[in-house]
Amino acid sequence: MAGYYNGQIVLELDNKAIVNELNAQTPTRSAHYGLIMDIKQVMAGFATCKVHEADKAAWQVLLRDKYPKPFVFHDGRLAFTPTFSAAIAMYTYIPFGIFLAIVCSTAYSLLPYRVSVPIGALTGMRSRIIAGPADAVEKDKADGRLYVCNHRTLLDPITVVAGLRKPVTAVTYSVSPVSELMAPIRTARLTRDRDEDRRRMEGLLARGNLVVCPEGTTCREPYLLRLSPLFAELAAEVTPIALETRVDMFYGTSTKPTSKVLDPLYFMMNPRPEYRVEFLEPVDTMTVADGHGHDDISHNIHVANRVQRVLGEALAFQLTEQTRKDKYMMLSGNEGIVKAKAKKS
């Protein structure tokens, strides 16, 4: 709505009578009032609001830095304003988009990356790989290298592997069994039990390269969530990977468990989806913070915050203290943990 919000009033008076009196005192075109005394009078209050075409012409899209609060989390599939013409274009494009998504996903699942990446480009998928230092991409350690990236979509590990052109295992939390089955890379499920997850990741890292997304959930906007410090206990150094995505029609993320299996499909249905992958300088996890030992939880948190800053600087993203739990409590009213069904004896 255009205009000004001047506050709240509490009066034992009739809503319509007040509006009529105000309009009688200020009969100009721009002087219109909408008064809502209580929830029962919401419709009556809005009925008194009038918007002229001249006022609409002056409306502008609110810039991000003008938002009252940071716009970190939101849900829904549409990545554009659904005007009438845009909606018609979307419904016209959907059958073609589904075909392109199936072709692209089939190529990435069945063909080597040197073949599937060009096929993806033909379907509209744009990928930009910034190699960074040679040590971060080419040099392999005897016990595997640990890659730490921010989380944009479920396709993050696949894009990282395509950029590295070598085997990497990705750890997952609440990914559906169907998504794990269709994934063209090795995946390992975690339990959200700290000791068990650490044991599993140490075993995976001893056998090869490992990629983790310590944010724990995806974030669509240019913000970084707080990183879980568990990864800081696994290796002497980690390689941060800055990921950025752009879509023009559909968001490839969701909070509903039944919809997550379709997240990659929606991302690839965009006319020109884009991934930007930048390999950054390795970060030493052994450097001890002042007053803390290496095994101290405070040191691990310090390392996680340092990696978050490195990623934020590379992406020009704003750092936050928000977590996975905050996102799901805000958008779906739960902690986003899918409880496993008890097996019948």
Image: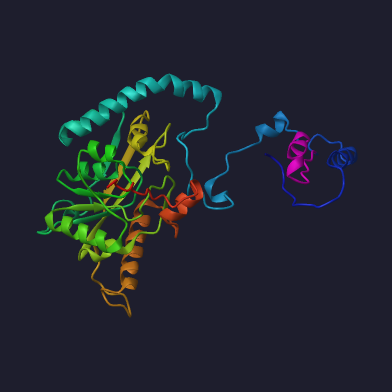
**Residue found 50% across the figure and 24% down from its top:** 87
Q: Nearer the viewer, residue 250 or 133?
A: 250
Q: Is residue 155 above or below residue 307?
A: above
The image quarter containing residue 39 is top right
**Residue found 30% across the figure and 62% down from its top:** 194
- Please tell me whether residue 302 belongs to the stretch shown in magenta: no
Q: Nearer the viewer, residue 266 or 311?
A: 266
> Which of the colour schemes (rainbow, by chain, secondary structure, one colour) is used?
rainbow
- Please tell me whether residue 35 belongs to the stretch shown in magenta: yes
Query: What is the x, y in percent for residue 337?
Result: 39, 50
**One can see residue 123 in this view:** no
Q: Is residue 35 above or below residue 285?
A: above
Query: What is the x, y in percent for residue 227?
Result: 36, 59
Q: Which residues are magenta?
A: 32-48
The image quarter containing residue 144 is bottom left
**Residue found 36% across the figure and 64% down from its top:** 305
In this image, 297 relative to 88: left or right?
Answer: left
The image quarter containing residue 58 is top right
